[in-house]
Image (spheres, rainbow, N blue to C red):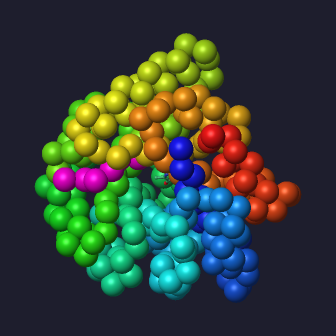
Amino acid sequence: MRLCVNIDHIATLREARKSFEPDPLFAAQLAELAGADGITVHLRADRRHIQDRDVSLLKEIVKTKLNVEMASTNQMVEIMASIQPHQVTLVPEKPNEVTTEGGLDVILNEAQLRQTISRLNSHNIRVSIFVDPNLEQVKTCSKIGAQAIEINTNGYATSKSEKTIKESLKLIEDCAKLGIKLNLEVLAGHALNYKNVNQIVKIGEISELNIGHSIISRAVFVGMERAVAEMKSLLG
Ligand code: PXP
């Protein structure tokens, strides 16, 4: 299973002082040195952490794969068309949310998303869609032409009882199986950490995880390379 490291929170720290440091570019290079298979950033409409400059320069220096999370808007499509990251992940975005709160409602936004995917694909950008573990949503991702889905693991990660953990895992597994059947690449992420990642690693249909907060939190104490290497070793 591949590991994409989300480095948004390096930029969060920089923006706390509107400073030049710490630079997410250094974090990306250290993550790659430590074995990361990709770098993920979220370019938000409010630019609260990652800036346009970060995405442009990351595209130049990332040797593995650059995945940019973004809302499905005209402005974002235009920016990505000029930067051309390897992959875009479409996510819902609310101005005051602390983090992405859930998957995209692909069924509700089918026509708009279809257009965005086609525009991004025409610039050689692969498109993944962040979805909740729901079979109908997964089916619609395939119908509108996405190349991949990223299954939202937040429900699993925040489950408190054995019963709800089991139920969440079953939902994720069923969606992963359906995704593969529909020729989608199946990725997963959100709220995964060094403890709860083990159950997700067992789902063979999932080929890649996006993990940010827990890796960056650990990196504050043990350093970026060690934090990434430790997570990577848990992915087998
Ligand atoms: N996947 C998506 C679509 C996200 O929006 C985020 C958070 O930016 C992540 C994965 C990573 O989540 P976390 O920071 O909880 O590991």
Seen in the image, is 212 located left or right of residue 21? left
The image shows residue 48, relative to residue 100, as above or below, that is: below
| Residue 61 at x, y percent in the picture | 55, 80
Q: Which residues are magenta?
A: 145-150
| Residue 182 at x, y percent in the picture | 23, 38
Question: Does residue 39 belong to the magenta stretch?
Answer: no
Q: Is the C terminus in the top left, top right, bottom left or bottom right quadrant?
A: top right
Q: Nearer the viewer, residue 127 or 21?
A: 127
Q: Nearer the viewer, residue 89 or 15?
A: 89
**Would you identify the image quadrant in which residue 220 lies?**
bottom right
Q: Is residue 95 visible?
A: yes
Residue at coordinates 44% horizontally, 21% vertically from top-left? 170
Residue at coordinates 60% horizontally, 15% vertically from top-left? 162
Residue at coordinates 79% horizontally, 57% vertically from top-left? 226
| Residue 143 at x, y percent in the picture | 16, 45
Residue at coordinates 66% horizontally, 73% vertically from top-left? 29
Q: Is residue 134 visible?
A: no
Seen in the image, is 19 located left or right of residue 161? right
Seen in the image, is 112 located left or right of residue 192? left
| Residue 97 at x, y percent in the picture | 51, 55
The image shows residue 210, relative to residue 176, as above or below, that is: below
Seen in the image, is 108 located left or right of residue 68? left
Q: Nearer the viewer, residue 111 or 222?
A: 222
Residue reaching furthest to the right: 221
